[in-house]
Image (cartoon, rainbow, N blue to C red):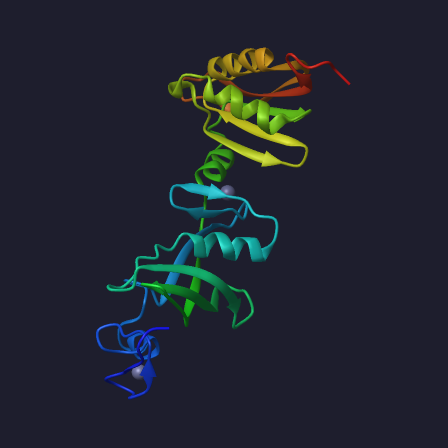
Amino acid sequence: MGRVRTCASCGRGSEVLLRGLCPECFDRRYGVVEGLPWELVVDVCTSCGRVRIGHKWLEYATAEEAVGLMLSSMSLKPVHPVERVELEDWALETRLDWRTRVRLRFRANYRDTLFRVSRVIVLRLNPSTCPLCIVRRSGEYDTLVQVRGYRAGEAVEKTLNSLDPREAPIDVVPVRGGVDVYFHHRGAAARFVSRLASTARVRVSRVEHEHVGTSSLGRRRSRKTILVRLEGLTGERGE
Ligand SMILES: [Zn+2]
Ligand SMILES: [Zn+2]
């Protein structure tokens, strides 16, 4: 137990003082998070519902998970001399909507002392369209590879990691039962599918062409969908 000292503001005794203040008075005067926004604005795609966290558009299963993702995008830089701040917990103060009041509970550390403070911020959803939905809507993608079946997500990730970054797809979207991979060019899609075949036992089940109008050069444009079923990873016995 340390020596009890007196807070310069409220006069109560405290074992730890920050700039002469007890943790509550320090928090009231300075806060514990540097530049904590009173309003956190998060882009939400009105078409697919994904939220933008940094440069990624992320999916979520529940509204609660979505709020957790959005809050995780805040940077929690402690106010000197606080050494560490973590978001311990949060609770909605109003129903989740385009503007929602959220109570944040922080755990702060200073030397060996841990204290908790809370703040209310407004979480504001900014209606947007993610790049994938722009592409889908405009029909600017050329080939969609729908990977389904045995450990599809894992096989796709492994395959993408082994490809030249210049051959990267436009977007990779986890869906029920697998992953959708969108490509600008069918050459890149073909290389992806053949590389996938070295990662997993592949059965190309279906290739569909869909005419999507005429290009500016007067040629008929078509879009391709390749459905790929995985039956197992290579090196594993099937079934
Ligand atoms: Zn005080
Ligand atoms: Zn979207």
Spot occupied by residue 118 in the image (x, y as percentages of width and height): 42, 72
- Vertical placement of residue 56 versus 69, above or below: above
- Vertical placement of residue 208 versus 129, above or below: above
- When asked about the image quadrant of residue 33, the answer is bottom left
* Nearer-the-camera pick, 46 or 23: 23
- Does the image show residue 15? yes
Which residue is rendered at x = 32% and y = 84% of the image? 13
Would you say 35 lies left or right of 184 here? left
Quadrant of image for the C terminus:
top right
Tally the marks: 0
- When asked about the image quadrant of residue 74, the answer is bottom left
Spot occupied by residue 104 in the image (x, y as percentages of width and height): 45, 67
Spot occupied by residue 109 in the image (x, y as percentages of width and height): 36, 63
Rendered-image quarter of ligand 1: bottom left
Residue reaching furthest to the right:
239
- Vertical placement of residue 184 versus 108, above or below: above
* Nearer-the-camera pick, 61 or 221: 61
- Does the image show residue 211? no
Which residue is rendered at x = 56% and y = 69% of the image? 95
Which residue is rendered at x = 54% and y = 27% of the image? 181
Which residue is rendered at x = 30% and y = 77% of the image? 3
* Nearer-the-camera pick, 79 or 134: 79
Residue reaching furthest to the bottom:
11
Would you say 27 lies left or right of 52 here? left
Quadrant of image for the N terminus:
bottom left
Would you say 182 lies left or right of 177 here? left
Spot occupied by residue 119 in the image (x, y as percentages of width and height): 40, 71
